[in-house]
Image (tube, grey):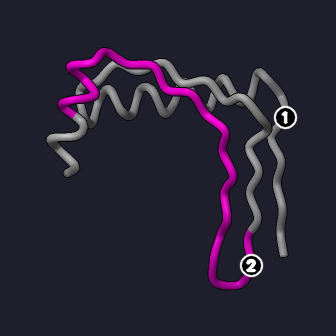
Amino acid sequence: MDEMNIRSAFLKNAIANIIEKVINQKIGCRTEITFNDPIQMTCDDDKAMVHLNVDVELKKEDLEKLLKKFL
């Protein structure tokens, strides 16, 4: 079993910025993502487990756009 814990504020912010850019490019929604706890990942032979405690801030109309697109 492999494990990874990302605790560094610098690295968590870098990951958040990448996710924000991808969401903006693919969906057209501007978001602000904040990881509250370390990012924890565990991998077994055939599955992976990722634990996230994250806050996402976005405009109400962007949330409605996301819900319409995925529901």
Q: Which residue is mark 2?
A: 44
**Quarter of image, res 3:** bottom right
Say which of 29 and 53 sits in front. 53
- Amino acid residing under circle 1: Arg
**Mark 1 nearby-residue class (10 Å; few <14, some 14–19, many ≥20):** some
**Quarter of image, res 48:** bottom right
Does 59 lie within the magenta span?
A: yes
- Amino acid residing under circle 2: Asp
The structure residue drawn at horizontal position 41% and vertical position 26%, both measured from the top left corner, is: 21
Q: Secondary structure at mark 1?
A: loop
Q: Which residue is mark 1?
A: 7
Give residue 58's position: percent from left, percent from top: 37, 19
Q: Which residues are magenta?
A: 43-65
Q: Secondary structure at mark 2?
A: loop
Q: CA distance from mark 1 to mark 2?
A: 21 Å
**Mark 2 nearby-residue class (10 Å; few <14, some 14–19, many ≥20):** few
Q: Point out the residue furthest to the top here.
A: 59
The structure residue drawn at horizontal position 24% and vertical position 34%, both measured from the top left corner, is: 27
Q: Point out the residue furthest to the left here.
A: 68
Residue 8 as seen in the image, left or right of residue 56: right
Residue 9 as seen in the image, left or right of residue 60: right
Residue 57 as seen in the image, left or right of residue 13: left
62 lies above or below 45: above
The structure residue drawn at horizontal position 76% and vertical position 21%, both measured from the top left corner, is: 10
15 lies above or below 61: below
Give residue 41's position: percent from left, percent from top: 74, 57
Does 38 lie within the magenta span?
A: no
The structure residue drawn at horizontal position 73% and vertical position 70%, both measured from the top left corner, is: 43
Give residue 4's position: percent from left, percent from top: 82, 54
